[in-house]
Every structure is written in structure tokens, then in C-alpha cells.
Image (tube, helix red, strand yellow):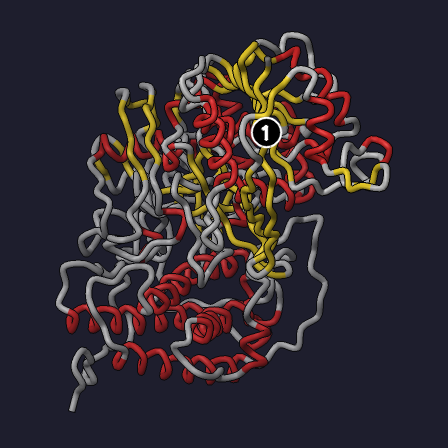
Amino acid sequence: MNTPGTTAEIPVTMGNGPLRAVRLDGRDPGALRADILRAFHATFDRHESLFELLRDDAAYRVKPIALRHPLIFYFGHTAAFFINKLVVAELIGQRIAPRLESLFAVGVDEMSWDDLDDIHYDWPTPQAVRAYRDRVREVVDGLIRGLPLDAPIAWDSPWWVILMGIEHERIHLETSSVLMRQHKLEYLKPHPAWQPCRDSGVPPRNALVDVHASHVRLGRDRDQPHVYGWDNEFGAHEADVAAFQAARYLVSNHEFRAFVEAGGYADDSLWSEEGAAWRRYARAAHPTFWVRDGGAWRLRLLAEEVPMPWDWPVETNFHEAKAFCNWLARQSGQPVRLPSEDEWHALRQLAGVADGPQSQPAPANIELDHWASPCPVTRFAQGPFCDLIGNVWQWLETPTYPFAGFAVHPLYDDFTTPTFDGRHNLIKGGSWISCGNLALPISRYAFRRHFFQHAGFRYVVSHARTQPPESHYETDRLIAEYCEFHFGERYFDVPNFPRALAELCIAALGAQPARRALDLGCATGRSSFELARHFGHVTGIDFSARFISVCTHMAERGRLRYTLVEEGELVTYRERTLAELGLAEVARKVDFFQGDACNLKPFFSGYDLILAANLIDRLYSPAQFLKQVHERINPGGLLVIASPYTWLAEHTRREEWIGGFSKDGENHTTLDGLQHILGAHFDRVGAPRELPFVIRETRRKFQHSLSEVSVWRRR
């Protein structure tokens, strides 16, 4: 008898089942559960059938390339991934095989050629891994059949973890096939489920298609995902795309042959420094899947070599694609390059390619609907182009980056963030083996530029320059802590300190002129922006160039990204924007400079207010600053000083302290010192007050301090 929300009896057909992305919205829960179960088994089956291409046990244990593990790792990795994530998600209470789940957990990504992994592993036999996979299959099948299901599924649902495992296996279905293609042929055998295309003909002459100027909107909503997606797909990005021209076809083996025969691989001027370094390491003189056979060329496929199909797309890494574009630009006199991500989506809009899964069979060489190989570049048309999706992936000019609103999934926080380093370029469109999320035009996958995937390229002609998108996360611990202090969460119900200070300043000023303000010791700048709500112009100054670079970045781009320490080496990723704080419109009224509060340039004067926040006990000569500050404030203007009075000799020599010691047998506080020095030019306004502030160090460690705030009016 079934419990509500569960379905115990769902027929599952083993073999080549559905490999499409599962629609998650507008579905009957029973039908959705059945689709997920079929997708799980179809993907698990297809992945296992790929490994049936390996001829014997030795084929599992020999590395196909030096930069990757042997294939036995990838055979076990996808199953171990399921168990590891289900344990973390608390959907299962115990592991199946702890040793295997540790052995197969990490080490997936290919290493750089100068960082080879020489660790020797005690790999299990293929038979042992198959038995392990059978046990994992049983566990996941049971969860899918019995776990309560409420549709639609969003990324905070426990079902998201199951979908994550399915899509993760589809990724490795593809990447493992690339490794097999790089394996020695002696380790492989033909398989009826993995037959290549046998068609080839006269290569087409490529042509340029005009693409009009357009506007693109990218990104997905985490609350309504419709289909499964990885973290980098969510958020928002908009861009205006200038008119350009794009190649009708993917670059074919025939078109690329001209570059090879012209000596393109030997011409350093066509290659980036990184590309030339890879080329020398690999001793590359032609595409890696091209094989010389006397005076002819052959093409390496999954498990065989065939006479070169010149009308199929060439398959390269990014460096080779970029060098070809540079060569073609020289030959044609036109600005030839790879498309940007925005331009690729402009092509998609022109061709009318929708976001979601394709019909079946797909009108493209994708999702294993046709062959286990590429096919002629003229076979599948989408709008005025061929192979805009499918056949082979297409390298883009754009290094991967996070959309605005990016957030990591708590159960897979390192899926994308390691690629935000400027060294991983996006690929788009999918290949013949791309299934599920991989086959969606809205997916975003990126690889190291020397990486080989089933990837080729299409070129564009454009005078527009491509700007590297912002992908940097501030990892300096002190800077990141101050980013959170200024722009981040509210902890222990303590109000945001920089904002509270600015509001206090504005209230103290009352109806007096509010033309110009100076925020001294501005740190990462929140008070400067808050003061600009009221003042005509605000200048922020800090001694630290690193702080000022953060302020300037926030003012210019309206966004900060930074990492926060959770515990030990574990971090979380944060993004803050001026817009979400209601400060986007005031950024134009703020500028920032590096400077020494004790020795400011003369033109920093004429202010109606100067705020010195948590500064006075960090100056090397606070008395020098206090004796001169009146020269920079207009008569009737205010000086606001906030400080916890944490006098430390590492910041201020003991003889320079203005308080916090005994004098003539009496306690001499910092407020006494301020009165003594500032009394010559200022009157104190009201009694000092204390403002609390909290600085987060880790998830469980915070600094909770009190800053005394005093207000002084210049006579």
C-alpha cells in the first residue's frame, strides 16, 4: 500500500532511456517522480554502457592522459558523488563503502601541465566498482520511489540533490567519453550503442551572416528554476550587443586545414603567451584528434580512426581556436575573433532557439539522438546558422564569471567558484553527447583553455572589444571582514555601524548647510555612501590603498563580491550591491582617495562635516591631526569622532596617546584629551554616546565593541 505522495511501482526500462532535462514545474507529483526515476536509470545505464567500450581491466587503470586519473576513478566517482551528497543532505543515515566514497570523491579536474599528480592510488577492480554502483543504484532508486514529493521542485528541495546527482553523472558521461577518445585504441573496442556518423561530403565554403544590434537578458530565478541548473546559471545579466557578423558554419576540418598548412602552429605571433606555453608542452602541430597516416589524415573517434571527414567540425582547445582567429584576421584584414557569451545569445535569439529541452529526436546533433560522434557541419540548420546548438561545443571569448545575484548551493559550494579565476573560458551549444542540463542553451560550462572537450568554434567579425567580466571575489581576510562589516548582514540585532554613524551625523547637522562632507578612515566606504544621501558631495579617504580600491570598485560597479571564513579553510561567498541598499543613485556624489589623515593635501578642505570613524586610536600622531583639523572645516561645521579608544603601541607610540592613562594622579581619558586639544577651536555638542558594532571573523567568532561618539562644532 502506497503512502501519500509516494509511488512504489514505477516501471523502468533499462537501456537507452530518456536523457532530457526533467521539467520541474506544472507537473503532477506522481508523473514528476516517474520522470525523475526514468532519468536516473537511463543516465546510470548510459554511463555504464560507455565503460563497456574498454577492452579489459588494464584499460581502466592506465591514464588516458597524464593530467587526469585513470578511467577507473571516473567509473566510481559519479556513484560516490550520489552517496556523499545524500549523506551531507541527511537523506541517508550512513555510507555504503566509506573507503570508496573517499577514494572517488576528489581529483576530478584536470591539472595544469606543470602540476602533475604523481600520487599512487590503490584502485579497486572494475568488478568491485560495478558491484558498488549496483548498491548505489538501489539506494537512489529507493529514495526516488519513497521520498515525499511536492511539485514544483526548487533548489532548496531535498529532491534537488537527487537531480544534482543525475546531472553530475551526465557531465561525466561526456567528459569520460573525451578521455576515452584520448586513450590508446588498443584499450577500446566497438560497441553497438556507440556508433559514429558515417556520412561525409564536400566541405562547405563558410560565409558571414549579419547579426543586428540587440539586447540580451540572461540568468535564471532560483525560486522558479523550471529545470535543474547549476549555481552559475542563476542571477541576472543584461547587455546591449553591437551589430556584428558571424560564421554560418562551425569551422570545419577543411577550413582549419589551411591554418595548419600555413604553419599556424609554428607562428608564435598568433598565439597568446599561455597558448604558446601549452603548444610547446604538448608539442602540438595539428589538432589533437587528427592522426597522420602517411600523406593522408585520419580522425580519431571514440573507439576507431576513420578517414578524415573534412566537412565535420574541427575540434580544438581554446588556444588553437584563438590562434586560428588571429591568423584569419591577418589573412582577411578583418577583426576576426571568437564570440562573447552575449554575442552567442544574440545568435540564439536570431535563430529562434528556445531555452528549454529540445523535442525528440532533436533538430540537432545533441543528446545522443543521432550518433556517437560529430557529423557534417551542414546537416542541422537553426535559423540562418548551422549547429548553433549541438555537434560540438563552441569556445567563447568570455572567461566565466558570476551573474549578479550569484550564490553557491550549500551542498556543492565549489562547483563553479574555483573557475572564477580568469583562466576558464565558457563553451556554449552542447555536443553530440551533451544530455540534460548540458544540452540547454541556458547552461554555463567553462573549462581551462588547454582543456579538450568535444569542442570546436565559430568565429565572428566585430569591431566591438570584449571586456573581461567581473569575476573576482575578494579573499583577503581583513578586507572581506570589512566588506561584511560595512555592507553585510546584521548580527546580534546590532544596527549597521557605518549607516548608524552617518544617520547620527545628519541628525546632528540639522538644518545647517550640507554641501560637502569628508569621511576620514572610510575603510570600505559604507558611511561615505550613506552621507551622500544628504550631502551634495562626499569624499572618502583611507590610509589603506586596498580599502580605497574596494571603495572605488563599489562606486564604479555598484557591486562587491567577497569570501567569508566559515571555519578553517571553509568559506562562503557573498555579493552586495549598492542597489539593494538603496544607494545606487548616490554613488555619483562620492569619490575616494588614499591619504594620511595627519598629512592631508591642502585641497581637502572647506567641509561642512568631517567624520573620523574608529580612526583616532589608529593614527601615528592623533594630536597633530586634532590640532589641524579645524582648518578643513567651515565655521559652524561639525567634526564627529567615533572610537573604541583601543590604544595600542603597534599603531600609536605610547607618548603620542592623547588619553587612556593616568596624569597627575588622575585618570586621563581620551575624551579629556579631545576636549583639551579641540577646545581651542570647537565646542562639544551634547554628551557623548556609545554606538555598538560587530565585526564577523568566522561563523562562530565575532568582535563586539562599543565606539564612543562625540560631536564638535567649529566656532
Q: Position of residue 450 (x, y in %)?
A: 57, 43
Q: Residues within 10 Å of mark 1 (few under 14, many from 20)?
A: many
Q: Which residue is painted at 86% across and 37% down in the image?
A: 664
Taking the view exactly as shown, the residue that stands out farthest to the bottom is 1
Q: Position of residue 277 (x, y in %)?
A: 68, 37
Between residue 595 and residue 597, name the one nearer to us: 597
From this view, report whether residue 310 is shown above or below residue 103: above
From this view, report whether residue 139 is shown above or below residue 701: below
From this view, report whether residue 408 is shown above or below residue 518: below
Between residue 620 and residue 340, name the one nearer to us: 620
Q: Quadrant of the N terminus?
A: bottom left
From this view, report whether residue 628 is shown above or below residue 545: above
Q: Which residue is painted at 20% across and 73% down in the image?
A: 34
Task: Count all numbered tags in the image, as a single digit.
Answer: 1
Taking the view exactly as shown, the residue that stands out farthest to the front is 665
The answer to which quarter of the image holds residue 428 is top left
Q: Which residue is painted at 67% across and 17% down in the image?
A: 629
Between residue 155 and residue 612, name the one nearer to us: 612
Q: Is residue 390 left or right of residue 654?
A: left
Residue 587 visible, this orientation: yes
Which amino acid, mark 1? Answer: Cys
Q: Position of residue 556 (x, y in %)?
A: 48, 24
Residue tagged by mark 1? 522
Q: Position of residue 543 (x, y in %)?
A: 69, 27
Residue 288 visible, this orientation: no
Between residue 260 and residue 620, name the one nearer to us: 620
Q: Which residue is painted at 76% across and 40% down in the image?
A: 647
Q: Quadrant of the C terminus?
A: top right
